């Protein structure tokens, strides 16, 4: 992974991009690419790049051009099928100057236009500038693994991997929260692109390409998920047996893992949580590591969250070098401001904080790339949300049935304060809206209602602004036409991928925590061939009655220690609100949640926040705090820190950058004149 940025004049009246602004953008992204930096500039466009060298260490510098030096690219990510594409392009007559995947993307664009993106198997955010035609092409991978933010200001388009680089480019760019983005976050857990958190700054939608062409702008999806439709719902579009599916999933996962291990010119490590998904990746990855596989795990001082036993079991079976970092509540509190500075958005859980510490551990051991198990739960129906949706739909068909309601007791067994332990309250909560069991978003309704409860803390002004938006209605209004023809599980998976996975798990908890310490994450379960296979499977191969990830468990039986396969699912979690309570809480917490700071940000009502703080202070353990109160305190604190760091003050531009490539056509043309 790397950092990309640029400025493009959208009309003839706009000034050319300044070299100083591009340098500031590159400096703000130096943590994403500490190895090298480069600039390109002409009368219309400027491109900046900071490089984390992973493939073609000696000749893969950027910005990079085609052989005619007219089509320029800045690229963040990896293309795992670039060797195969390179061979195809050579047959077509293309000649290459480097061994990098980036140059393959440039030539693929020249050969196939925007249709090239459909051929890429990988993770990316990129900008291609055609200096002859004045056309800018922006593209982002199918799931939004790599970030790309956009801002139009004063006749120019600014784009960058991170918002801080856009703010660094021009001090005149307004800095304020977008009420629609705040409303989405405190409903869906995240913004949904193109919506952003800050006014005037959008995100490019995953799986999309946007083209700026001399005053016109057009955008389209180059990829859409495909699930079985009505006539195929019972069996899926996969025509094999369950055992056939096991064989094919095993083969596809092994191929996806191998690609992500061998397509690197540096050692590749692996995160190991102790769960099924990362264990599968680690046990497969060791076969292709070329040396003892280095694995990395989180331990928690709070026993409720700790999975050390299972992590060490798999680490021992993998035969590699295992590394651990112990995380306490105090550790989470100490680094939380840094976490928010890198996340660049409010978060409702502290879970990204331990991962910030884990990526630091990875970097300290000289590893630049790690594989993770992210995406398995979304592709193979691993979350309790999918089980919950199935139970509630079953119950909704006979809402008076007490036996059907008792199925709720099989949900959320890992929570110390499980929402199903108090049966009367559980039936009231989960029984809400049962009549709409066939409606879009039904399975997610309970999460969205719980999260929306935090909006009771909004200030009067934010309440008035947020009342103009309806995050759920807006999301459901933009569903693809074929959504209604998919089965219930496919609908639930689509919404989970569109919201939580893309905007939170792959961003706040993924890319941003990894790249804070210059580490690239790779995700075998998000390989395009494996995703297409998973989507084609019958629903009951994935969620068999209430057994989540059924086909994946069968795959794992011959690969992963049996104790890990058989264990009850325990999602990754971390201590939350109580990290910030008590006499040992850092001073910044009191400052950020003070009446003065709350009134300055004007997102939350000081009196409501004070009551929440009093309630949290009276508790003794996370299990004593409700899910809603835990999320509320973390959400308020993260928003306040975000306001301090990005709205009330100007984020640091980062360290100075040393340019490896410096193409300044504007300067040369002025000299010639």
Image (cartoon, grey):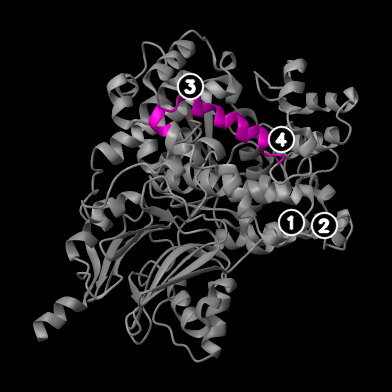
Q: Pick whichever, 151 or 625, lies toward us.
A: 151
* Secondary structure mainly formed by the magenta segment: helix
State how far apart marks 3 and 2 are (Cα): 42 Å
State how far apart marks 4 and 3 are (Cα): 23 Å
- Quadrant in the picture for the C terminus: bottom left
Which mark is on residue 647? none
Residue that numbered label 4 is attached to: 384
Which mark is on residue 245? 2
Q: How many marks?
A: 4
The quarter of the displayed image where residue 643 is located: top left
Q: Residues within 10 Å of mark 3 (few under 14, many from 20)?
A: many
Q: Pick whichever, 547 or 558, lies toward us.
A: 547
The quarter of the displayed image where residue 257 is located: bottom right
State how far apart marks 4 and 2 are (Cα): 23 Å
Q: Pick whichever, 663 or 627, lies toward us.
A: 627
Which mark is on residue 534? 1
Residue at position x 23%, y 44% from top? 652
Viewer-nearest of labels 1 and 2? 1
Can you see residue 280? no
Query: Left or right: 410 with respect to 343?
Result: right
Residue that numbered label 3 is attached to: 577
- Quadrant in the picture for the N terminus: bottom left
């Amino acid at each position: 992974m790397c950092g990309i940025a640029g400025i493009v004049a959208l009309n003839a009246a706009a000034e050319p991009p300044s070299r100083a602004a591009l340098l500031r953008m590159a400096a703000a992204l130096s943590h994403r690419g500490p190895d090298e930096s480069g600039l390109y500039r002409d009368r219309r466009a400027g491109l900046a790049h900071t490089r984390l060298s992973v493939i073609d260490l000696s000749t893969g510098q950027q910005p990079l051009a085609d052989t005619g030096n007219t089509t320029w690219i800045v690229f963040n990510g990896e293309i795992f099928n670039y060797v195969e594409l390179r061979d195809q392009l050579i047959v077509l007559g293309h000649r290459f100057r480097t061994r990098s995947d980036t140059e393959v993307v440039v030539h693929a664009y020249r050969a196939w236009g925007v249709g090239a993106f459909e051929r890429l198997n990988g993770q990316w955010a990129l900008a291609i500038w055609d200096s002859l035609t004045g056309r800018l092409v922006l593209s982002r991978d199918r799931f939004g693994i790599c970030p790309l933010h956009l801002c139009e200001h004063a006749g120019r388009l600014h784009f960058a991997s991170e918002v801080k680089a856009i703010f660094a480019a021009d001090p005149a760019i307004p800095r304020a929260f977008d009420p629609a983005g705040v409303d989405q976050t405190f409903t869906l857990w995240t913004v949904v692109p193109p919506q952003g958190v800050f006014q005037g700054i959008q995100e490019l939608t995953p799986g999309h390409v946007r083209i700026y062409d001399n005053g016109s702008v057009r955008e389209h999806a180059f990829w859409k998920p495909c699930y079985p439709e009505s006539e195929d719902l019972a069996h899926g579009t996969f025509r094999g047996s369950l055992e056939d599916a096991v064989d094919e999933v095993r083969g596809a996962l092994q191929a996806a893992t191998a690609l992500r291990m061998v397509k690197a010119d540096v050692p590749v490590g692996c995160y190991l949580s102790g769960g099924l998904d990362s264990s599968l990746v680690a046990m497969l990855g060791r076969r292709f590591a070329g040396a003892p596989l280095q694995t990395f795990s989180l331990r928690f001082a709070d026993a409720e969250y700790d999975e050390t036993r299972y992590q060490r079991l798999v680490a021992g079976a993998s035969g590699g070098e295992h590394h651990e970092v112990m995380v306490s509540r105090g550790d989470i509190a100490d680094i939380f401001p840094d976490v928010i500075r890198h996340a660049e958005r409010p978060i409702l859980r502290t879970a990204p904080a331990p991962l910030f510490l884990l990526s630091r551990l990875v970097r300290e051991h000289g590893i630049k790339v790690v594989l993770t198990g992210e995406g398995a739960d979304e592709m193979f129906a691993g979350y309790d949300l999918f089980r919950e949706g199935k139970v509630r739909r079953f119950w909704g068909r006979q809402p008076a049935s007490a036996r059907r309601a008792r199925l709720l007791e099989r949900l959320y067994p890992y929570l110390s304060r499980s929402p199903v332990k108090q049966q009367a309250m559980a039936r009231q909560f989960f029984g809400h809206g049962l009549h709409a069991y066939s409606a879009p978003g039904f399975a997610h309704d309970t999460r969205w209602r719980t999260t929306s409860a935090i909006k009771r803390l909004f200030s009067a002004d934010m309440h008035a602004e947020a009342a103009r938006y309806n995050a759920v209605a807006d999301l459901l209004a933009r569903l693809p036409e074929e959504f209604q023809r998919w089965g219930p599980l496919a609908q639930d998976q689509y919404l989970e991928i569109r919201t939580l996975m893309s905007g939170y798990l792959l961003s706040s908890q993924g890319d941003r925590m990894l790249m804070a310490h210059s580490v690239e994450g790779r995700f075998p379960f998000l390989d395009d061939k494996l995703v297409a296979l998973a989507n084609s499977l019958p629903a009951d191969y994935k969620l068999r009655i209430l057994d989540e990830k059924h086909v994946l468990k069968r795959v794992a039986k011959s690969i992963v220690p049996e104790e890990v396969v058989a264990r009850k699912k325990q999602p990754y979690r971390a201590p939350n609100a109580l990290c910030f309570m008590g006499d040992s809480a850092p001073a910044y917490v009191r400052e950020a949640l003070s009446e003065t700071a709350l009134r300055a940000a004007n997102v939350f009502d000081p009196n409501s926040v004070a009551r929440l703080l009093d309630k949290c202070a009276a508790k003794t353990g996370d299990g004593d705090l409700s899910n809603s109160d835990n999320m509320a305190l973390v959400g308020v604190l993260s928003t306040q820190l975000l306001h301090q760091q990005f709205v009330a003050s100007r984020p640091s531009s980062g360290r100075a950058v040393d340019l490896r490539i410096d193409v300044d056509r504007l300067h040369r043309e002025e000299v010639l004149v």
